[in-house]
Structure formats: C-alpha cells, structure tokens
C-alpha cells in the first residue's frame, strides 16, 4: 500500500522532508531538538521525582480530568498543573494524575501555544 509523501520540514529554510506523521521536523532537526532539550535527568526528573511521581499516582489512581467529566480512566502520567517551563514547581499541589489521552492533549496545548492562557481543568 503506498504511503503519503513526507511534508516539508517546519524548520525555516530547511528543504528536507519530515518522515514521521505528526512531526513537522525532518530527522536532522528532530535530533537537534532532542539534543537541546536534554535528558530527563538533566531536566530535573531524578530519584526524588520518581518517588513523588509514585506518590501522586498512588493518591490519584484515576485521571483527574476524566473524573471531572464523569469517566474513570487510570492515571498513568503525572502532570504539572503550572508547567515547569512557566515557573511551576514539583510541589504536590502543582501535580495531578492524568491518563495518556488527557496528558497528551494538555502537552500539545502547552507546547503549541494554542490555548496557552486557559487551563483544561
């Protein structure tokens, strides 16, 4: 079955094609983005974070946003209500358990700038 052709890389001036669906960057610029971002440990997700994450998931076994909508979906991710990139902290009152769907939606909104002023919950 034929596949769709790649789209032009979203990096200004780059003429390569993006190979992954949903990722606007070519493989070279995707790698550069990941190198700039650093590892999880370099971004502050250390052993103390691992303990805090387990605590949040233990206290909130169901996704907070799904519960508010009347659904029971298991929490898998720990989300910063105010993102660390906006000055949020790892304090317990800034953390909540989310399912993958809600976490992905929240991350996409935060990283794209769409709806950046409004919160999902």
Image: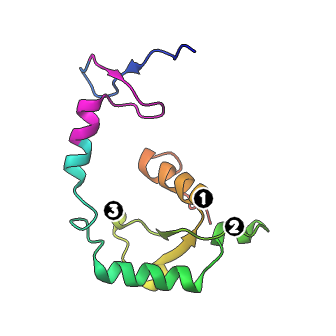
- Classed neighbour count for the residue bearing mark 3: other residues with Cα under 10 Å, few (<14), some (14–19), many (≥20): few
Is disc 3 in contact with disc 2, using a CB cutoff of under 8 Å? no
Distance between the alpha carbons at the discs numbered 3 and 1: 19 Å
Per the rendering, the mark at residue 73 is 2
- Residue 36 placed where, x, y %? 20, 49
Element type at mark 3: helix
- In this rendering, the answer to whether 52 lies above or below 7 is below
Point out the stretch of residues depicted in magenta: 15-32
Element type at mark 1: helix
- Residue 97 placed where, x, y %? 56, 73
Q: Nearer the viewer, residue 1 or 31?
A: 1
View extreme (front): residue: 1
Disc with the residue nearer the chain's start (2 vs 1): 2
Q: Is residue 26 magenta?
A: yes
Quadrant in which residue 45 is drawn: bottom left
- Which of the two marks, 3 or 1, is nearer to us in this view? 1
Is residue 30 shown to the viewer in this render? Answer: yes
Q: Is residue 89 magenta?
A: no
Is disc 2 in contact with disc 1, using a CB cutoff of under 8 Å? yes
- Residue 46 placed where, x, y %? 28, 76
Q: Is residue 41 left or right of residue 76?
A: left
- Name the residue at 25% across, 65% down: 43
Quadrant (top left, top right, bottom left, bottom right) of the N terminus: top right
- Which of the two marks, 2 or 1, is nearer to us in this view? 2
Per the rendering, the mark at residue 85 is 3
- Name the residue at 37% across, 78% down: 50
Distance between the alpha carbons at the discs numbered 2 and 1: 10 Å
- Name the residue at 29% across, 37% down: 30
Disc with the residue nearer the chain's start (3 vs 1): 3
């Amino acid at each position: 079955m034929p596949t769709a052709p790649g789209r032009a890389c979203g990096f200004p001036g780059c003429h390569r094609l993006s190979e992954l669906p949903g990722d606007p960057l070519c493989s070279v610029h995707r790698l550069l983005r990941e190198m700039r971002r650093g590892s999880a440990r370099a971004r502050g997700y250390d052993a103390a974070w691992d303990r805090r994450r387990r605590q949040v998931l233990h206290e909130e076994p169901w996704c907070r946003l799904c519960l508010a909508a009347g659904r029971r979906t298991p929490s898998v991710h720990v989300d910063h209500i105010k993102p660390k990139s906006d000055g949020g902290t790892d304090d317990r009152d800034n953390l909540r358990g989310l399912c993958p769907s809600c976490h992905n939606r929240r991350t996409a909104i935060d990283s794209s700038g769409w709806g950046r002023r409004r919160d999902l919950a």
